[in-house]
Amino acid sequence: MGDLRAYAALLGGQFRSVTSYRASFVVELFSSAGATALDVVTVVVLFGAAVEVGGFTLAEALMMTGIAASGFVLGDLAVGSVERIKLYVRTGMLDAVLVRPLGVLPQLVLMDFPLRKALRLVFGTSVIGVAIALNDVDWTPARVLLMVVAPIAAGVYFGAIFVISATLSFWWVESGEIGNGFTYGGRDFTSYPITVYSGWFRGLFAYGLGFGFVAYQPGLALLGRPDPLGLPGWAGYSSPLVALLAAGIAAVVWRVGVRHYRSTGS
Amino acid sequence: MDGIGASVLVVSPNRPSRASVTTFRALVWSGFRRYATYRQATVAGMFTNIVFGFLRCYVLLAVAGGAAGGMAAGYDPTQLATYVWVGQGLLNVVGIWGWTDLSDRIRTGDIAADLLRPVPPVTAYLAADLGRATHGMLARFIPPVIVGLIFFPLAVPARWQTVPLFALSVILAVIGSFACRFLVNATAYWLQDARGPIMLWTLGSGVLTGLYFPLRLFPDWAVAVLWLGTPLPGLLQTPLDVAAERDSPALQAGLVALQAVWAVIMLALARLVQHRAERKLVLQGG
């Protein structure tokens, strides 16, 4: 209970700080939602120049874009602030986090909880809504369940990617933007049907790293389309398993990373 | 390195502009060295540029593949690949994102030290930014272009004018980008914290400079408004169109001239805003 109260205090502090600079918070809230909107606008503009992209229409692709956007926002909202660990490791501020009798990851997450990104979630889920309205989905109980679970699983998956990318800075302090290639790069990758990509690049991102199971496979299952790349229909329903696997790997990597931390020595 | 130390510069009575040229050169060099220091961060940033290069290239090629005649917005697939990979290389030369030096210094009050210097702030920051861009050209431009050449068929320039015009266009893009960033940062003179304007700039500039996709995918009237009414296409789209040889030589030269006009306007605006801000600061301090 004591732990929970401490976490609540950290979150409460964040809440108080944003409510004391209200104008600034509102600007950030809307610009942050604008970023997600622009990603979707990009998809719409690109599909506007072609009849089909990678064998999919805009309506079909929006199903994947919606799941990807909602999932990314969930993961980013929940643990995205772990990106700041680079700063904590470089300056040695992580010491202060380690000596407190609380979990390291929850502290880092709550110390900079990005409330300004909340509006993005509304936008992400509304894209799924639009996609459902545009496509003629053949509803079954399994599909209804998948529609709810897929964005959450995508959120867990992106959260795992955020944590794994951030852990890199325990070994390589100057790792800088490398993590962005997988977090924001992963978001861009999953926003389109993976038939768009090809060769080893698709193999690596879609199947090697598992990004294909975040939005593409569940999207196909919701649309009732067979996979042009040959995976069976149940692959779409495996997205929660892939997400849990990623979360498990992230937990292990994080623990190894924290043990490896040796402060700055200053 | 004569005349570059902290001591007073030796001014030749015969050539009065010599001191300012030497100072400018010293500031460019310092900007170059500052960015050359973080070698690991350069490698990390390059990796990310390349990942995004693959993503953007595949998506645009798929768009061209799904469009009538295999052309998207008048670019054939090899031109699109050139557009993407040269764009990934130029992103950190032009440097539209991540520059908050000026607004940070305004917020902390360090700007007072800049105002005491004999070099006007716009000139000093421009010099440092040209140094940063030179480093970007050597360290950040070439690797993505080579990766693009290895994995995708790129359109290689066929006209002799393309190379000098591209070089000129890149220099103008750096100056235009610097002036825009200076203005966005300078809002901190009035707002104290420029985070809001910087966020809006980051959002708008990614799309409206042509980084995410070529601007010609927009309707024609929007393209005309953007090109004539804003400096933004001049920051990436113009040099990339020159490199991909999207237009006839005459039109390309015209677009670069338009880019030059906008670079001059924005730089003049930056000087004007800085001047107004200085008067305001003096009033406050007085």
Image (cartoon, coloured by chain):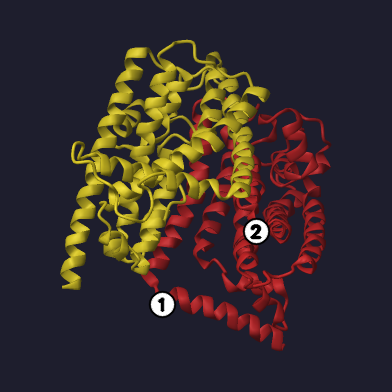
Residue to which mark 1 is pinned = A20
Is residue A182 at all visible to an observer of this figure?
Answer: yes
Amino acid type at image mark 2: Gly
* Rendering quarter of residue B12: top left
Numbered tag placed on residue B1 in the rendering: none
Query: Which residue sits at x=41%, y=37%?
Result: B209
Q: Position of residue B180 (x, y in %)?
A: 33, 45
Q: Residues within 10 Å of mark 2 (few under 14, many from 20)?
A: many
* Rendering quarter of residue B192: bottom left
Q: Which chain is yellow?
A: B
Amino acid type at image mark 1: Ser
Q: Relative to A115, is B67 above or below?
A: above
The front one of B219 and B280 is B280
Tell which subunit mark 2 falls on: A
Query: Which residue sits at x=63%, y=23%?
Result: B149
Q: Relative to A225, is B277 above or below?
A: below
Q: Which chain is red?
A: A
What is the total number of numbered labels drawn onto the structure image? 2
Q: Quadrant of the N terminus of chain B?
A: top left
Query: Which residue sits at x=42%, y=27%?
Result: B239
Q: Are marks 2 and 1 on the same chain?
A: yes
Q: Position of residue B81 (x, y in %)?
A: 57, 24
Horizontal arrangement in the rendering, residue A25 relative to residue B180 (left or right) = right
Q: Relative to A208, is B284 above or below?
A: below
Is residue B96 at all visible to an observer of this figure?
Answer: no
Q: Position of residue B220 (x, y in %)?
A: 35, 26
Query: Which residue sits at x=46%, y=37%?
Result: B134
- Helix, strand or loop for disc 1: helix
Residue to which mark 2 is pinned = A75
Tell which subunit mark 1 falls on: A
